[in-house]
Image (spheres, helix red, strand yellow):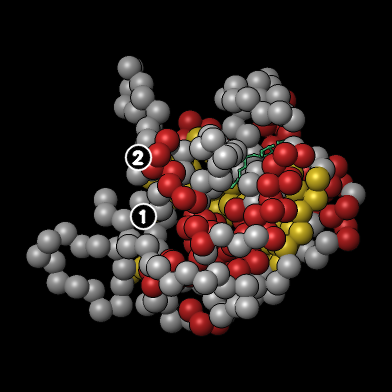
Amino acid sequence: MESRVFLDDCMRFLANAAKEAPLFDFTFLDPPFNQGKEYREHDDRLGDREYWDWMREVCRLTLNHSSPGAAIYFMQREKNSENVLRVLRESGWQFQNLIVWRKKTSAIPSEVRYGKAYQVIAFATKGQRARVFNRLRIDPPLPNGYKPREKGMFVTDVWDDIRELTSGYYAGDEALRYDDGGRIHKQQSPIALLLRMILSSTNPGDCVFDPFSGTGTTLVVASQLRRVGVGVEKDEVNFGCIQTRLRDARDADSILQYRNHYIHTSSLSEIWPASKADHSTNASVPMLLN
Ligand SMILES: C[S@@+](CC[C@H](N)C(=O)[O-])C[C@H]1O[C@@H](n2cnc3c(N)ncnc32)[C@H](O)[C@@H]1O
């Protein structure tokens, strides 16, 4: 399946061009977090009110163009959970879960309270019930001496088996880099994170939307899973990077390396069909230990 990316402001896209796109069955919202980071095309120092009003409007316009029962996953810093839940509610989304994505290698330190070692991902739906919810099974390693599980376990709302790409050399091959080794985009999301959300909340042929595409991780995963990806990115350099990433498949972007993690999922061959676009690698990433 083809994924498409548009060079645009996501609000303008949602108000206009989105009408030409299929209804969204899934949206991943990973906006700038308004924490003073440097973006070429975005001011990350907005007033609180302006920022959250903007987020509410993005959520509202996305809802308007979503199918009944569609899913949205809104990722944010833990300290903003309250606002995330509020803007989702005020824009008409129905809350389902607050997912804790526990970081493997990094934390935001604090001298006056505990350091922050996780991000939140609010999962909500258009209407009371998700149109698709595929119950995935994983099989994370057990402590020594425990009897192996025969069928793994269902994924819960704590995700502690997905490594972030944000910290230095831990980012590995998956991080997109310039020739001198510098990171192209410091907020690149991991393939494994998008794989879990898209597999859980969509079926092949469904439309997957990412209004803040960044490096295009959502679209790269959507294509491999035979979903129709629609992305928007405002920055021309990132936009070019997404086009290259979609065109020239990289082994590090292959979702096949994670297939074994989900092998106990009963519907796996239906929700994750073999694809011509599958990358060549057969290497498998072991599930991470805590
Ligand atoms: C946190 S990053 C997303 C990273 C992405 N999840 C990935 O895997 O690479 C947010 C992105 O939104 C883009 N952006 C900021 N404001 C935007 C807007 N109004 N419309 C579209 N994109 C925007 C930024 O240029 C940045 O690349």
Question: Callout 1: few (<14), some (14-19), or many (20+) C-alpha neighbours within 10 Å?
Answer: many
Answer yes or no: disc 2 within 8 Å of ligand 1. no
Q: Is residue 4 visible?
A: yes
Residue visible at 31% across and 56% down in the picture: 288
Residue visible at 40% across and 53% down in the picture: 162
Residue 87 figure quarter: top right
Residue visible at 58% across and 39% down in the picture: 178
Viewer-side label of 2, 1: 2
Residue visible at 72% across and 39% down in the picture: 237
The residue at the far left in this view is 145
Q: Is residue 247 left or right of residue 10?
A: left
Q: Is residue 181 left or right of residue 53?
A: left
Asked if 186 appears above or below 209 in the picture, the reply is above
Marks 2/1 in contact by CB < 8 Å: the verdict is no
Q: Which mark is residue 179?
A: none
Q: Is residue 164 left or right of residue 43?
A: left
Question: Which residue carries the number 2 mark?
Answer: 105
Question: Callout 2: few (<14), some (14-19), or many (20+) C-alpha neighbours within 10 Å?
Answer: some
